[in-house]
Image: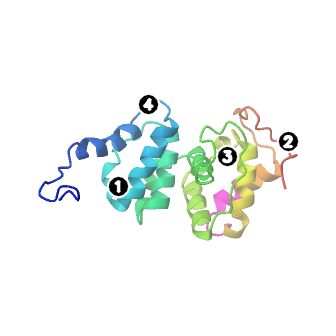
Amino acid sequence: MKSRSHPNSTLLPLGVADFRATCTTLLTAKSALSLADRADLTWFFQTDGDAGLTLIPATVPQRKHTALLGALLLRHTSHGVDRFPTYVTTATDVLRLAVVLSDGDVCLATPKKFRSFVRAERRLLLERREACGNSIEDMLRYPETWNRLGERLHPGEYQTRFPRSAAAFDVICNEWPVATSVPSSKGQSRRDRSTRR
């Protein structure tokens, strides 16, 4: 590639491979990603699109990283959702993905107010939750956040297609008793309906 300021010289892509490898390094990190790290990952996929799929490592050790990755695949690639069965495997993975798509805290520290999802996104999130099987105990860790998400996904409309998801949301939203030893996370009370619309 020729330099505009020096037309007789050539610009060499020094360090390009190392720079692109940063994406893979960030996704394999075992520690939390900084805001700068998240911005770098977003830039890679915004810039490369489907070519960014080649930067994804075989294993992403941190569930919080997979949520960010899932959101980037959905936003910036045409067929990255094909990777979802590999990275979105639990109900909490689905919840984190929905939170990241709503620009929320992937740590799930507090209940999140979700944005409106388009129909394709609603189907995708319900499809992945359906694939998790009978994961009501996982959902009961964050009941209020799931309740808010249910208000956006309208699982009852997909009861025939995703029956397990519809049944699980029915338990969460109506507070049906469930025999479980899993406590709700801090700030996620099943009895607190004060934030329900």
On the image, the x and y values in percent for residue 158 come to 66, 68
Camera-nearest residue between 76 and 195: 76
| Residue on which disc 2 sits | 192
Is 11 displayed left or right of 96 in the figure? left
Look at label 4 and name its amino acid: Lys
Quick one: label 3 or label 2, which is nearer the N terminus?
3
| Residue on which disc 3 sits | 136
Between circles 2 and 1, the one closer to the viewer is 1
| Residue on which disc 4 sits | 30
Which stretch did the figure color magenta? Answer: 159-168
Camera-nearest residue between 172 and 42: 42
Is 181 displayed left or right of 34 in the figure? right
Any part of residue 63 in sight: no
Q: Which mark is residue 53?
A: 1
Q: Residues within 10 Å of mark 4 (few under 14, many from 20)?
A: few
Give SS at disc 3.
helix
Measure the C-alpha gap from mark 2 to mark 1.
42 Å
Check the picture and name the quadrant holding the C terminus: bottom right
On the image, the x and y values in percent for residue 74 come to 49, 59
